[in-house]
Amino acid sequence: MKNVLLLCFMLIFGAVSYAQKATCVGKWTTIDDKTGKKKSTVELYKKDGKLYGKIVYLYPREGRPDNAVCEKCTDDRKGQPLVGLQIVRGLSWDGEEWEGGTILDPENGKVYKTKLWINDDQPDKLNVRGYIGPLFRTQTWIRVED
């Protein structure tokens, strides 16, 4: 009987632990598509049942001022500091992925429709896909360990 209880406890604890780890909420390192270098840390968080994300850290890069702002943004983020800038907005959970929101690329000021998901076999990698019409590009962000 003790073995059965222990096994049940381990299964429940393991499932809860996995479910918590597989969430998109948390901090993620973004990688530059061209150089393969770390670009920023983005914190994803929920607000009113929707998913949002903001830049919380920029990795140093030659030629970028210390207090860089979004110069190429064309909406309410124009001229706002990059650190603290909300780049992911309004995604909804559909049971398998976050979708229906937008993501901003502060490098070019463009806003893309987006969806985010984590593959079951890689819980520390976040797939981030941005769309313009039928065209899309997918990046992989890496979970930041506490």
Image (cartoon, grey):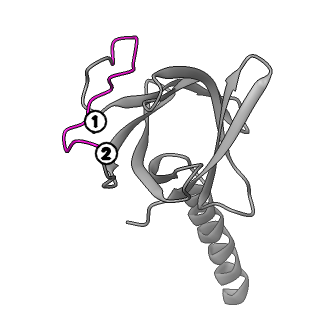
- On the image, the x and y values in percent for residue 2 come to 66, 88
Regarding residue 13, the answer to whether it shows in the image is: yes
State which quadrant residue 99 falls in: top right
Q: Farthest residue toward the front?
A: 63
Q: Is residue 75 magenta?
A: yes
Q: Label 2, label 1: how many angstroms apart (C-alpha)? A: 6 Å
Query: What are the residue bounds of the magenta stretch?
Result: 64-77
The residue sitting at 27% across, 39% down in the picture is: 83
The disc label shown at residue 56, or none: 2
Residue 87 appears left or right of 56: right
Disc 2 residue type (three-letter) = Val
Residue under pointer 1: 84
State which quadrant residue 15 falls in: bottom right
Residue 76 appears left or right of 18: left
Residue 7, placed above or below residue 78: below
Disc 1 residue type (three-letter) = Gly
Foreground of the two, 134 or 117: 134
The residue sitting at 34% across, 52% down in the picture is: 61
Q: Are marks 2 and 1 in contact (CB under 8 Å)?
A: yes
The disc label shown at residue 138, or none: none
